Amino acid sequence: MAEPPKGENRRDEDDAGAAFVLQSKGEWWHAGFHLTTAIVGPTILTLPYAFRGLGWVLGFLSLTIMAAVTFYSYFLMSKVLDHCEKSGRRHIRFRELAADVLGDYYVTMVSQFNNYNW
């Protein structure tokens, strides 16, 4: 990848929120709750429709399984972030983490696939 231009208007190394994020001392479950509320917030409006189709028992079972899978993925992601930080690489964006773990080529291909209009 090409390096960004190094001119007078370019900031040193951090963008607007990087300094705050790099100083945070939160746990993995703090991030999990924040990400869950951000992702689930708009989609919670479809929960009554889903429960109507699934019923109470299957609806709560599905909801519980999805919550467990979500928080387990947050737990795994925090383990990878901790491992990278102990190796001297701290990431503040999911794309940077994915590029470090999977490689730039794979992340670019996935990004292109996601941007493709079917």
Image (cartoon, rainbow, N blue to C red):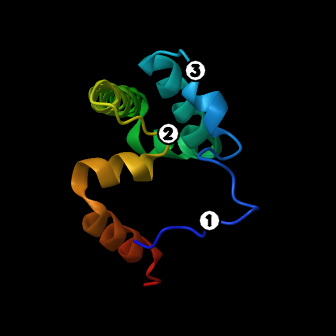
Mark 1, secondary structure of its residue: loop
Q: Are marks 3 and 2 in contact (CB under 8 Å)?
A: no
Q: Which residue is mark 3?
A: 24
Q: Is residue 14 above or below residue 74?
A: below
Query: Which numbered circle lies on residue 17?
Result: none
Residue type of the residue flagged with mark 2:
Ile
Q: Which residue is mark 2?
A: 92
* Neighbours of disc 1 within 10 Å: few (<14), some (14-19), many (20+): few
The structure residue drawn at horizontal position 26% and vertical position 27%, both measured from the top left corner, is: 83
Q: Residue furthest right?
A: 9
SS type, badge 3: loop
Q: Earlier in the sequence, mark 2 or mark 1?
A: 1
Q: Residue at x 43, y 47 (%)?
A: 94
Residue 50 location (% of width, % of height): 48, 44
Give residue 6's mark. Answer: 1
**Residue 2 percent location from the top left of the image:** 45, 73
In this rendered view, identify the residue nearer to me: 95 or 113: 95
- Occupied quadrant, residue 70: top left
Q: Amino acid at mark 3?
A: Ser
Task: Between label 1 and label 3, give the one nearer the viewer.
Answer: 1
Q: Residues within 10 Å of mark 3 (few under 14, many from 20)?
A: few
**Alpha carbon separation for disc pair 3 and 2:** 11 Å
The relative height of residue 34 versus residue 25 in the rendered view (above or below) is below
Closer-to-camera residue (15/5): 5
Residue 4 found in image quarter: bottom right
* Figure quadrant of residue 44: top right
Label 2 Cα neighbours within 10 Å, binned few <14 / some 14-19 / many ≥20:
few
Task: Name the one closer to the observer, 42 or 16.
Answer: 16
Q: Nearer the viewer, mark 2 or mark 1?
A: 1
On the rendered structure, is 46 left or right of 59?
right
For badge 1, the amino acid type reads Lys
